[in-house]
Image (spheres, helix red, strand yellow):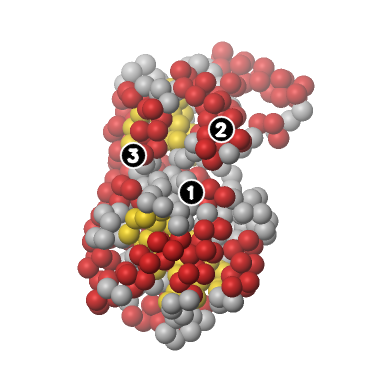
Amino acid sequence: MNLRALAKPAALAGRCAAWRLREALGLGAGGPPVAMVVERADWAIKWYGSFIVERANALRPGIAQVVVDPAPLSRRVVQFGSQYQWVDWQRFLPRSNRHVVSFMHGKPEDGPEVAAHVARFLDTVPRLDRIVCSARLVMERLASWGVPREKLVNIPIGCETDRFLPPTPAQRAEMRARFGVPEGSICIGSFQKDGVGWGDGEEPKPIKGPDLFLEAIDHLRREIPVFVLLTGPARGFVKRGLDRLGVPWAHSYVETREELARCYHALDLYLITSREEGGPMALMESMASHVPVVSTRVGMSVDLIRDGETGALVDTLDMRVLADRALAILALPDGAAAMRAAAREAVAVADWGVVGRRHLEEVWTPLLGDGARP
């Protein structure tokens, strides 16, 4: 959420005065002691916060709630699912809260807007009690920027390992038929939002690497018959590029997590060609679904992929190298069965139950026991 879109300055000033009055009267202290702030859009940040709260509440009923507006909250542990939300909101929030933020991804090299955001974020670090990093490389990056290590916690983004499951032969055949995957084609997945905004997505988001994905597909189509399955909003740039390459594709606008899980059943391979990531969630979902992953060295791929055992990591943005690794995996005996099994075992550390428990035990409970409202 961006506060600049909330109201004109006068109206916002009036709202801030009302918030301060509520704080003085202690009116924001009711409800669960922990609040997880999510985005309104039904996408990754909302899923992230909702699953953490659900799993933590299963262990300690009533410990947390999901909110989209943190303004009325006081005397709580308030965690923001995105550092962008935190930067926008932080100057309006009462000092009685203990503040936590999930820092997913971002570095100055990603562009001037991200560089400006990182600078603003670092200015707010003194107000933060904990910063949850999904990937070790992100945590080390923040430490190198001078963020105190005692504020940093490495907890992965989670996965519903009980929902994202290996398909039966019948389930696989059903989904390949549904999307029109030709007999003998290799179905490659890309399930993300890689366009700017929530429209057609004709303008690409460079950090998500849609241009690199098309380069990788271009190399692969010269060696094998390729079919691409897309999900997620704002995929126009990729669809237009696939048409230009003459590569057949399908795009499924999934409405539920159950439907998304079934989409993985059609895949032979998943490619992550991003320049920067926090996860992505598709990494864990693919691994849990027995879909081999080839990834650039971003986000949680470095934590979860043992190169050559649970997937493949490439240390370059040269998509010829990534395509060669993909071809090597596809040539493994028995359809890379050993890699698929090892990947599902490796992703168990990111089950949402584990992630929710770790937030409860490593982040919230220490802060609740250290001056926050019991």
Q: Is 287 located above or below residue 177 in the figure?
A: above
Q: Which of the labelled discs sits on residue 136, or is there none?
A: 3
Q: CA distance from mark 1 to mark 3?
A: 16 Å
Decide if residue 300 is on the left or right side of residue 101. left
> Which of pointers 3 and 2 lies earlier in the amino acid sequence?
2
User: Regarding mark 2 in the picture, which secondary structure is present there?
Assistant: helix
Cβ atoms at labels 1 and 3 below 8 Å apart: no
Q: Which residue is mark 1?
A: 275
Q: Is residue 314 visible to the viewer in this orientation of the structure?
A: yes
Number of other residues with Cα within 10 Å of mark 2, as a class: few under 14, some 14 to 19, many 20 or more: some
Q: Which residue is mark 2?
A: 115
* Residue mark closest to the camera, 3 vs 2: 2
Image quadrant assignment for residue 173: bottom left
Q: Is 322 located above or below residue 277 in the figure?
A: below
Counting from the top left corner in percent of width and height, residue 140 is at 35, 33
Decide if residue 77 is on the left or right side of residue 357. right
